[in-house]
Image (cartoon, coloured by chain):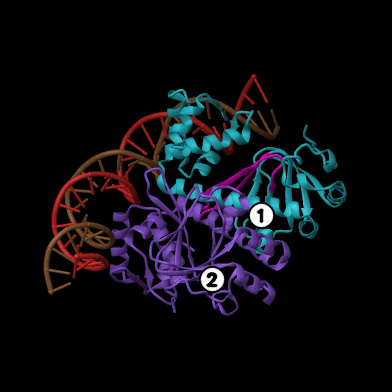
Chain colours: A purple, B cyan, C brown, D red
DNA sequence: TTGAAAAAATGACCTTTATCATATTTCGAT
DNA sequence: ATCGAAATATGATAAAGGTCATTTTTTCAA
C-alpha cells in the first residue's frame, strides 16, 4: 500500500523497519524518530540527493526502489547499488563529512522518510546496537564493492550480466526484475546495445523470460554457473 | 629504520601513529595497546591474512607497504588497495563478522603490529573519537570504491593507468613508485602485456621515467588530464 | 485512440585489449 | 662473477565489445 500524499507513516508499525538497521531501536527511540522525521511520497525518477550536495540526513525507504549511481565523465551513469524497502540511504557521506560522490533517485514511485542529521547522529551515540549495526553494514558493503571491482576487472560482460541478474533477482523477489535496458546496462557496466544483445541470448538459451521491461529468471542454476560462483 | 627482529615497537613513540586512526588515543589507552599488541617483522611477499580466514584482530603498519587484493576465478589477483605506514588493515571483515573476502600481503619488508580483536573492540567501545574515526574511514573507503567501480566500467585502460599512477604517486611519495608490472596490471585491472605497452607509451610521451621497477612521474598535469579528473 | 517521443532492437563496422608465442633482461642464490 | 629462473618486453593474432546508423516497438499525453 503506497501513500500518495504526504501522510505520516508511523515508525512503530512500519513493516519495513523490522529487517532494517532501525530494528534495534527501543520504543522510546522509535517514538522520537517518529516525531522528528518527515515522510514523503516520491514519484518515479525523482531525486533524493545529487552528487556534490552535502548530506543533511538519512533516507529510510518505506516502500519503493532507489538507485545509487555515479555519473562518469561523459554523463553515463554507473549504478553502484539498488536499495529497496527497509534500506537506509544517504548516510555514508554523512559520516565522512564530504559531499555526496553518488546520487540517489527513485526507480518507481516510493514512500521515503527522512531523518535529520543531528537526530540520527544522536541516536547513534546513545544506541550501541544501532551503531554496531551500521558499522557492520558499512563493512559488508565494502566487501560487496571489492567483489564488484574484481568482477568488473576480470569478467566478461556476459558473466557480469549473470552476476547482476542474481543480485536483482534477490532485490526484486518475488516480483520480476523491472528495470529499463539502460539502467540494466549501467549496472552491469556495458553499452545498452550490448546488454540488449545479451538479454536476447539469455532468452534464447531459456535462462530468462522477458515481457517488455519485466524479466523473470527461469534457470537460476545456469545463471550461477555463468556468473562463476 | 626497520626492525629486523621481533623487537618491540613502542606505540607512544611510533611516528606512524600520529596520522593514523589511533592518533586519538589517550596515553592510558596507548599504554594498554602497547602492552597487549605484538610486533612482527614481515619479509617481502609475506601474507598477513588470507581470503576465507576469520579475522582475529587488526594489523597496524609501522613501516612498509601492504597490498589488499582478491583472487578472481582464474587465480588472477585484483588489487583493491595498497596500504602504507600508519594505516590499519584487516578490521573491515572483523566488524562484518564474516571471513575475509580479501587477502593482504606485504609488498616489501615491513614492521607490522597486531592488536587482538577483543582489545580493539573494547577500545572502540570506550573511545568515541576512535569510533568516529573508524566510521569516517569506512565511509570514505566506500566512496573510493564507488569511484573505482565507475572507472573500471567506463574508462579505457590508458585512463585507468593514469588514475592509478596518481594514486600510487601519493602512496609512494616522495619515493618513486615501486611495483612489479604484474601488480601494477592487477591494480589497473588489465593484462600484464597491455600494461607494459602502455608504460612504454607513457615513457615515450615523457610522462614518466622508468628505471627497472622504479617509476617516477615527470608530468603530473598530463596524468591528471589523461585520468579525466 | 492516436500520434509523437522515448525505448528497445538490430545490423555493420571498427577499436581496444586479451591471448599466445617468443625473445630479452634482470635478479638472486651459489 | 655466473648460471638459471623469474620478470619484462615485443610481435602477431583474434575476439570481445563499443559506436553509429537505422528500424521497430512501446509508452504516454492530448
- B117 above or below A1? above
Badge 2 vs badge 1, beta-carbon distance below 8 Å: no
Q: State the separation of the CA atoms marked 2 and 1.
A: 21 Å
Q: Residue B135 got which mark? A: 1
Q: Dot 2: within a 10 Å radius of its alpha carbon, few (fewer than 14), some, or many (20 or more) residues?
A: many
- Left/right of residue B41 with respect to residue B195 in the rendered view: right
Q: Secondary structure at mark 1?
A: helix
What residue appears at the point 53 percent right and 75 percent down from the top-left corner? A9
Query: Where is mark 2, residue-wise?
Result: A86
Observer able to see residue B22? yes
Q: In the visual, does A135 lie left or right of A8? A: right
| Residues drawn in magenta | B65-88
Task: Using the image, name the chain to which the residue with label 1 belongs.
Answer: B
Q: Nearer the viewer, residue A224 or B144?
A: B144
Residue A130 placement (x, y as % from top left): 67, 66
The part of the image, by quadrant, that contains residue B92 is: bottom right
At 52% from the left and 24% from the top, the residue drawn is B218
How crowded is the residue under tag 1: few (<14 C-alpha within 10 Å), some, or many (20+)? many
The subunit carrying tag 2 is A
Residue B74 covered by magenta stretch:
yes
How many marks overall? 2
The answer to whether residue B76 is magenta is: yes
Residue A56 picture location, percent across and down: 57, 55
**Residue B192: x and y, percent?**
48, 39
For this view, does A28 lie left or right of residue A213?
Answer: right
Q: Residue at x 29, y 60 (%)?
A: A196
Task: Tell me what residue is drawn at x 37 percent, y 49 percent.
Answer: A76
Q: Position of residue A99 (x, y in %)?
A: 54, 48
Is residue B10 shown to the viewer in this render?
no
Residue B64 circle label: none
Asked whether A77 or D1 is in front, the reply is A77
Residues indicated by labels 2 and 1 sit on the same polypeptide chain: no
Amino acid at each position: 500500500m503506497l501513500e500518495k500524499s504526504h501522510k505520516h507513516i508511523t515508525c512503530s508499525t512500519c513493516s519495513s523497519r523490522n529487517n532494517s538497521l532501525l530494528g534495534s531501536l527501543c520504543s522510546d527511540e522509535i517514538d522520537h524518530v517518529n516525531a522528528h522525521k518527515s515522510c514523503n511520497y516520491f514519484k518515479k525518477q525523482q531525486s533524493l540527493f545529487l552528487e556534490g550536495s552535502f548530506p543533511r540526513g538519512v533516507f529510510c525507504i518505506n516502500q519503493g526502489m532507489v538507485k545509487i549511481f555515479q555519473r562518469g565523465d561523459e554523463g553515463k551513469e554507473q549504478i553502484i547499488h539498488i536499495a529497496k524497502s527497509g534500506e537506509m540511504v544517504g548516510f555514508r557521506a554523512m559520516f565522512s563529512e564530504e559531499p555526496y560522490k553518488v546520487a540517489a533517485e527513485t526507480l518507481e514511485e516510493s514512500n521515503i522518510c527522512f531523518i535529520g542529521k543531528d537526530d540520527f547522529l544522536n541516536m547513534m551515540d546513545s544506541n550501541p546496537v544501532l551503531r554496531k549495526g551500521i558499522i557492520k553494514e558499512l563493512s559488508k558493503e565494502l566487501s560487496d564493492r571489492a567483489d564488484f571491482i574484481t568482477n568488473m576487472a576480470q569478467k566478461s560482460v556476459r558473466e557480469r550480466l549473470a552476476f547482476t541478474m542474481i543480485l536483482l533477482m534477490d532485490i526484486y523477489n518475488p516480483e520480476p526484475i523491472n528495470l529499463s535496458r539502460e539502467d540494466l546496462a549501467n549496472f552491469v557496466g556495458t553499452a545498452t546495445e550490448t546488454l540488449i544483445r545479451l538479454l536476447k541470448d539469455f532468452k534464447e538459451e531459456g535462462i530468462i523470460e522477458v515481457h517488455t521491461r519485466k524479466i523473470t529468471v527461469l534457470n537460476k542454476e545456469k545463471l550461477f554457473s555463468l556468473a562463476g560462483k
